[in-house]
Amino acid sequence: MTSNETGATAESAAEAVADLCGDRELVVVSNREPYSHDREDGAVVVDRPAGGLTAALDPVMQRVAGTWVAWGDGDADREMVGPDDAVAVPPEDPAYDLRRVWLSDEQVEGYYRGYSNQVLWPLCHLDTAKVEADPAFWAAYRDVNREFADAVLDSVEADPVVWFQDYHLGLAPRRVRTERPDAFLAHFWHVPWPSWDVFRAGPQYEQLLDGLLANDLVGFHTDEYCRNFLDCVAAATDARVDRSSRSVSYRGRRTFVRAFPLGIDARRQAELAESDAADEWWSSFREEYDVDPDAALAVGVERLDYTKGIEERLAALERLWEASPEWRGDLTYVQKGTESRSGIDAYDRLQDRVAAEIERINDRFGTDDWTPILALTDHLPEAGITALYREADVGLVTPVRDGMNLVAKEFVAAQTRDPGALVLSELAGASEQLGDEAVLVHPRDPVGVADLQRAVHAEDVFAWLESTFETATAIERGRRSVREPDPRATDD
Ligand code: F6P
């Protein structure tokens, strides 16, 4: 097994966070919460989202004991908080506070389903035709961002270090900055940042840039997104953009813009791939679906989102079985599609179309002994997904646009046995790190996969945390000592 060549671990990442924070409190702010409480058969159960970000930040938060502010969307969330709307987590060994923000159905409609996912999401993924610029969406986004900012301000006494996550919270930094001029504010934008001609298709571009430029540090997955962001700032505001230091001077402050490609906990993924749970899941899966051990297996795992290229992929597979009949019976495709953002027309329609296409293709080519596409819609345990990756000959990660795509990295890290090939879209951020090896890898070429694995392990989630906080510390030290940024922070 390869190891993380940067030497970053959960412990060293936590140290980098502690270096920046010193005595100040760390506040992480995200739309999704790391723990939710739900009622099942009358009892309260704790759910932990499987998402990479929450899984990675949780151990760090446990070490630095800060506060995490997030939307409380579990149906038993309100029962579990104290008068300050906070609950100590993890439930079995409380180490930090989860401060919940409550949203009404109307706010969820306007802020989450509306502005976040029908304006910013399509805009950032270059699908301007899907942008629904309803003024009510914007009003809700503004209100909810104010509520998140107020929850941050209520949770801390002195000047905190605040780390905002993602496109749901573009305006919150400005409100926190106004109230706490000396706080250290950072923001990581998990989706692509589009070029100026696309970004300007959203009518509120000035307000969004004004919100984000209240941060000391803004992070993106790739250099391309950083450049696009700086282009937008230069075109839309009167800020001074210094491209050599990748910084922006605006309203009397300086904001640094840096690429921090998000990784996964690659070591954990490799261990999970070799676990008994993965073996057991795989045996029962093979039995249930009568998987032929000699046939090739391709796998695709994603939320059912129009950016993931699922329909295009199904069309490509259909062409393959049509043009090369020798693959019928010899290549099975497993599609794990998780229902996502239901209630938004574009997502509801996509789910219907994908289900219909799978049924049609299976009817067209399927036989008594072979189903071309196995569509898995039920919840899959993590070990099951990892087993699928491990056993697959091909991982199909073919989004039409994707900020990074952690599935590509999970697939590679899980290749602990007979390695499969990663077919990766060049329009995924992950292609900046994995693209050469992915396109060069032959399905039976273990050397190419080993190179991919080295990249995934070397640039894992702890390396991402450490580099974000080392950069933040350099900026903060420079700011505090000479009122000018530390030159180290300007080295790209
Ligand atoms: O890719 C952006 C992102 O916010 C991810 O961080 C997350 O996994 C995904 O979208 C999930 O979206 P939602 O919270 O809408 O289910």
Image (spheres, grey):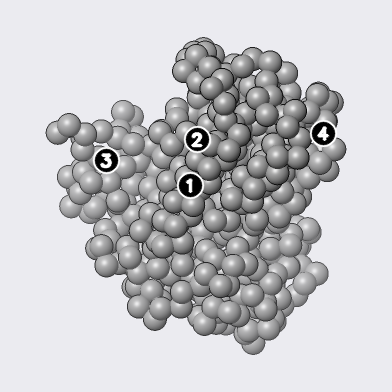
Residue at the outermost bottom position: 238
Where does the image place residue 355, in percent across and percent down from the top left? 47, 45
Q: Pointer 4: residues within 10 angstroms few (<14), some, or many (20+)? A: many
Q: Mark 3 points at which residue?
A: 37
Work out whether residue 205 or residue 244 is closer to the camera in this orientation and state it.
205
What residue is shown at x 50% (from left), y 35% (from top)? 375
- Image disc number at residue 130: none
What residue is shown at x 51% (from left), y 72% (from top)? 131
Name the residue type under label 4: Val
Discs 2/4, front: 2
Q: Which is nearer the N-term, disc 1 or disc 4?
A: 1
Q: Which is nearer the N-term, disc 3 or disc 1?
A: 3
Q: Mark 2 points at which residue?
A: 375
Q: Name the residue under label 4.
A: 441
Q: Which is nearer the N-term, disc 2 or disc 1?
A: 1
Q: Do the residues labelled 4 and 3 touch (CB within 8 Å)?
A: no
Tag 3's secondary structure? Answer: strand
Discs 2/1, front: 1
Residue 136 in sight from this viewpoint: yes
Name the residue type under label 3: His
Q: Pointer 2: residues within 10 angstroms few (<14), some, or many (20+)? A: some
